[in-house]
Image (cartoon, rainbow, N blue to C red):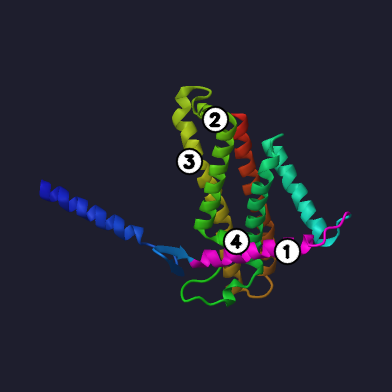
Amino acid sequence: MNILSCSINTLIKEGLYEISGVEVGQHFYWQIGGFQVHAQVLITSWVVIAILLGSAALSVRNPQTIPTGGQNFFEFVLEFIRDVSQTQIGEEYGPWVPFIGTLFLFIFVSNWSGALLPWKIIQLPQGELAAPTNDINTTVALALLTSVAYFYAGLSKKGLGYFSKYIQPTPILLPINILEDFTKPLSLSFRLFGNILADELVVVVLVSLVPLVVPIPVMFLGLFTSGIQALIFATLAAAYIGESMEGHH
């Protein structure tokens, strides 16, 4: 009996080890110290960050009292993000505008980069470049940042009393309320990842089948849905922060 149980445990361990090594597609990694870093995501994320910082710096390098051009555009974006934050968070929205705005702009530019930037012409030893949000690691990281943000918002305002929300309106709902906090980052990450991946796959398939005319409307539709996904993520992040500060509802 002991021999049989040992054999089963060995098979389970070996099977789990083999499953943990399974990868979907090919990936390009860097070895930094003792860590293995996903180079594809880092490269495209740095490009997106450089685009955001560069465009912002060029637009506000000579600010005018009456804004024009790039300054006018960025002020419009800022007002839009403020409106979203105020609507979802409430009167105490001010400190959270930079966080919500960073999420929105990074996701928006990342999504659009997948359709507008010619990532495919850059050859890597393994794998290929794509939008940062086309990788589940990026979307999970953004979702976990959102989770940390709304826990911090609730704890900073209510202290340990924040955890009383888990037994409201009745302690019977404790498991469901705890499960809700696990499903929030899952839904945020997989919604964004699935939509961007599906959009890029559809464009690639159509380009391979009908290279010239048909993919163009689909690409425009993809740009529209990519912007909507950025807005949905930022709006839900603000809503979660507002909910943690106001209480369970």
Element at badge 4? helix
Element at badge 3? helix
Q: Do the residues labelled 1 and 3 touch (CB within 8 Å)?
A: no
Give the amino acid at mark 2.
Gly
Crowding at mark 2 (Cα within 10 Å: few <14, some 14-19, many 20+): few
Q: Which residue is disc 1 drawn over?
A: 55
Q: Distance between the residues labelled 1 and 3?
A: 36 Å
Q: How far apart are marks 3 and 4 (CA)?
A: 26 Å
Q: Which residue is disc 2 drawn over?
A: 159
Mark toward the start of the polypeptide (2 vs 4): 2
Q: Which residue is disc 3 drawn over?
A: 182
Give the amino acid at mark 4.
Asp
Asked whether residue 198 is in view, the answer is no
Mark toward the start of the polypeptide (1 vs 2): 1
The residue lying at 58 percent from left, 69 percent from top is 204
Q: Do the residues labelled 1 and 4 touch (CB within 8 Å)?
A: no
Residue found at the far right of this picture: 66
Mark toward the start of the polypeptide (2 vs 3): 2
Q: Judge whether residue 199 is colored magenta.
A: no
Q: How far apart are marks 1 and 2 (CA)?
A: 40 Å
Element at badge 2? helix
Q: Give the range drawn in magenta.
A: 39-65
Residue 198 placement: quadrant? bottom right
The residue lying at 42 percent from left, 64 percent from top is 36
- Residue 233 rendering spot, x and y as whole percentages: 62, 48
Q: Which residue is disc 4 drawn over?
A: 199
